Image (spheres, helix red, strand yellow):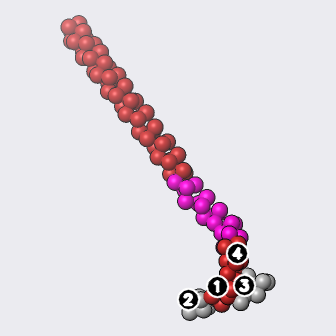
Amino acid sequence: MAYDSIASNEEVKKLLEENIALMKEIKEDTLYVKKYVVMSQILGFVKVIIVVLPIIWAAFYLPKMLSNVLAPYQELLGVTQGANLEETMKQIAPQVIKK
């Protein structure tokens, strides 16, 4: 009977050591996955910024830039000075812009 308890104690110790080794391996894998998830979230945010910032920039500055670019041609095309960009484009190419 004492022999059985010694054998079972050794088996339990062996199982505990195997369990500890497996837990360390699982912990390493979990840390790797956690780093991967964090990096993918950061890169996802960066991708959104790369797409959204140019759109916001274009919404604010593109009309001003186009009006500056089209200003010299307005006189040649006979467009009035007070016309906005949409009216100018309608006069330049009415077949392209239809409403």
Closer-to-camera residue (78/14): 78
Assign the magenta stretch its main secondary structure.
Answer: helix
The answer, for residue 59, to whether it is visible in the render is: no
On screen, residue 95 above or below 63? below
Mark 1 and mark 3 in contact (Cβ < 8 Å)? no
The residue carrying mark 4 is 67
Please state which of the two labelled residues, at mark 3 or mark 1, is closer to the viewer. 3
Residue 96's label in the rendered image is 2
Q: Amino acid at mark 3?
A: Glu
Q: Which mark is first along the chain, 2 or 3?
A: 3
Q: Residue at x 32, y 27 (%)?
A: 22
The residue carrying mark 1 is 89
**Distance between mark 1 and mark 4 Cα atoms:** 11 Å
Please provide the residue range marked out in magenta: 47-66
Residue 75's label in the rendered image is 3
Residue 42's label in the rendered image is none
On screen, residue 39 above or below 90? above
Q: Residue furthest right?
A: 82
Q: Amino acid at mark 4?
A: Ser
Rendered location of residue 91, percent (x, y) = 66, 90
* Label 2 neighbour load within 10 Å: few <14, some 14-19, many 20+: few
Q: Amino acid at mark 1?
A: Met
**Distance between mark 3 and mark 2 Cα atoms:** 21 Å
Quarter assignment of residue 65: bottom right
- Could you tell me which secondary element the residue under label 1 belongs to? helix
Q: Which mark is first along the chain, 2 or 4?
A: 4
**Distance between mark 4 and mark 2 Cα atoms:** 18 Å
* Label 1 neighbour load within 10 Å: few <14, some 14-19, many 20+: some
**Distance between mark 4 and mark 3 Cα atoms:** 13 Å
Mark 2 and mark 1 in contact (Cβ < 8 Å)? yes
